[in-house]
Image (spheres, rainbow, N blue to C red):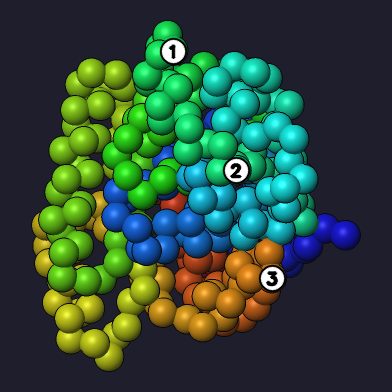
Amino acid sequence: MSAEIPKSELSQEKEPIRTKIIAVANQKGGVGKTTTAINVATALAASGLRVLLVDLDPQGNATTGLGVEKVNTEKEIYSAIIGDCTLSDTILPTAITGLEIVPASADLAGAEIELIELNQREARLKLALKEIFSIYNYILIDCPPALGLLTLNALVAADSVLVPLQCEFFALDGLGQLSRSIERIRNAFNSKLFIQGVVLTMHDGRNNLCKSVEADVREYFGSLVYKTVIPRNVRVSEAPSFGLPAIVYDMHCTGARAYMHLAAELLRGDGRLPEGEAA
């Protein structure tokens, strides 16, 4: 049975397919990257869009977080990147109407080494995505927490980068490193690549450090930082163990509502949702 989210939670008018590829990336682990990818993808699907989530992290947390058993996936993103199958062969449905996934397994860890020997090693994902490009409104790529060949493939394939950023002391250092990497990739491989936005995650408004980091990030990156912040929330942390996005697990919790607001903000920035329309 498909999980349904009331369309009134995040609504927009239908339109012809206009595909945008977004890499969800941060080389630092534990910043809420996969949680953000899963819940933004779910919220976009809830708005009536067709969405594909590509799990490019060997840990496969986006796969299990959407209730897909990794042991039952005969073909996954590793097979498509290496060239053993087409990307369409790997796509699986999820319990969310409008959301499909390209799963990952531990085999993907070997791709970092195997890609070195392949032609167009930095563009393997881009080439694989061409086959299904016009089917989806959004393709989100959940990147591994590293700036290796897998993340490089995601950034070469993507139109933009969504950066989850935990409100902690070293946040700006990590974001500066990622920004420099994006600039190098833009100059060498993908001139259209830009930062979609920075989303502050695991935010605790009672914590002075969180407030200080938020102020610094907003001062440095200005309008690139989303107005929506994602709070620390137990229900959001619990959801993956049930194979569900937080938006489905408990769509009334503060974390789920924040992700719906974030998706609405993203859609407004892309011109797909009228200004002023609430999530």
Apparent side of residue 214 relative to residue 155 in the rendered image (left or right): left
Q: Is residue 182 above or below residue 1?
A: above
* Residue 69 drawn above or below residue 259: above
Residue at the image position 16 percent from the left and 45 percent from the top: 177
Secondary structure of the residue carrying numbered label 2: loop
Q: Residues within 10 Å of mark 1 (few under 14, many from 20)?
A: few
**Amino acid residing under circle 3:** Phe
> What is the distance, in whole Å, between disc 2 and disc 3 at their CAs?
19 Å
Q: Which mark is residue 105?
A: 2
Give whichever of discs 3 and 1 has the lower sequence position: 1
Q: Is residue 98 visible?
A: no
Q: Is residue 62 above or below residue 186?
A: below
Q: Is residue 52 left or right of residue 113?
A: right
Who comes first in sequence, dot 2 or dot 3?
2
Could you say where residue 253 lies in the image, as x and y percent from the top left?
A: 57, 82
Residue, x 64% and y 57% (percent of image)? 64
| Residue 253 visible in rendering | yes
Of mark 1 and mark 2, the one earlier in the sequence is 2
The disc labelled 1 sits on which kind of residue? Answer: Leu
Dividing the picture into quadrants, the one containing residue 220 is: bottom left
Estimate the spatial distance between the alpha carbons at disc 1 and disc 2, rounded to whole Å: 20 Å
The residue that disc 3 covers is: 242
Identify the residue under disc 1: 118
